[in-house]
Image (tube, rainbow, N blue to C red):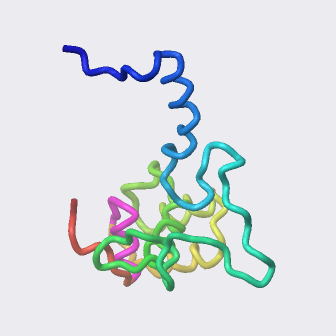
């Protein structure tokens, strides 16, 4: 016994699926619609923009033991350290960050690292700088 749709033909089914594809694609955040006409109107000049992130958080889903700000700052550090620099010691990391045009505050943080230690990951560098990483592993 076939359990297909008997109300419409295959062509109409395909057309109807295309009409709703903009509603079901994307992560579901405001403004993530495929079809431009489905995007919400922007907020007024004196009104805050729409968001699905809870108040006070800049990023939803921060791992346990870290705030969303910690996640953003660790990610910022990682943007200026390429995988070729890891594992690496303090001088290797500083040279790599400078090669990647890291801002002065990132280079200054890396200069605070103790000498003689090799770091395997950006998370290890982050912890050596005195910050917290997530408390649970997936």
Q: How many marks?
A: 0
Residue 105 part of the magenta segment: no
Kindly give the residue lying farthest to the right in the view shown.
Answer: 45
> Eyeballing the image, is 16 above or below 104?
above
The residue positioned 22% from the left and 59% from the top of the image is: 138
The residue positioned 32% from the left and 20% from the top of the image is: 4
Residue 124 part of the magenta segment: yes
> Eyeballing the image, is 63 above or below 96?
below
| Picture coordinates of residue 26, whole percent (x, y) | 51, 48
> Eyeballing the image, is 122 above or below 7?
below
> Eyeballing the image, is 122 above or below 106?
above
Magenta-highlighted residues: 118-129
The residue positioned 51% from the left and 43% from the top of the image is: 25
Which image quarter: residue 116?
bottom left
**Which one is in front, 99 or 35?**
35
Left or right for 19, reference 115: right
**Which one is in front, 16 or 132?**
16
| Picture coordinates of residue 69, whole percent (x, y) | 48, 79
Kindly give the residue lying farthest to the left in the view shown.
Answer: 1
| Picture coordinates of residue 92, whole percent (x, y) | 48, 61
**Which one is in front, 108 or 75?**
75
| Picture coordinates of residue 128, whole percent (x, y) | 36, 77
Left or right for 14, reference 35: left
The residue positioned 42% from the left and 23% from the top of the image is: 7
In the picture, which quadrant includes the N terminus?
top left
């Amino acid at each position: 016994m076939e359990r297909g749709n008997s109300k419409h033909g295959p062509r109409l089914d395909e057309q109807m699926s295309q009409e709703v594809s903009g509603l079901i694609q994307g992560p579901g955040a405001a403004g993530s619609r495929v079809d431009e006409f489905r995007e919400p109107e922007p907020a007024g000049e004196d009104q805050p923009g729409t968001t699905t992130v809870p108040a006070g958080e800049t990023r939803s889903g921060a791992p346990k033991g870290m705030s969303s700000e910690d996640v953003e700052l660790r990610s910022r550090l990682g943007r200026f350290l390429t995988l070729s620099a890891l594992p690496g010691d303090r001088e290797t990391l500083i040279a790599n960050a400078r090669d990647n045009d890291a801002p002065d505050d990132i280079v200054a943080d890396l200069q605070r690292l103790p000498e003689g230690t090799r770091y395997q990951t950006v998370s290890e560098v982050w912890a050596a700088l005195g910050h917290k990483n997530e408390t649970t592993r997936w």
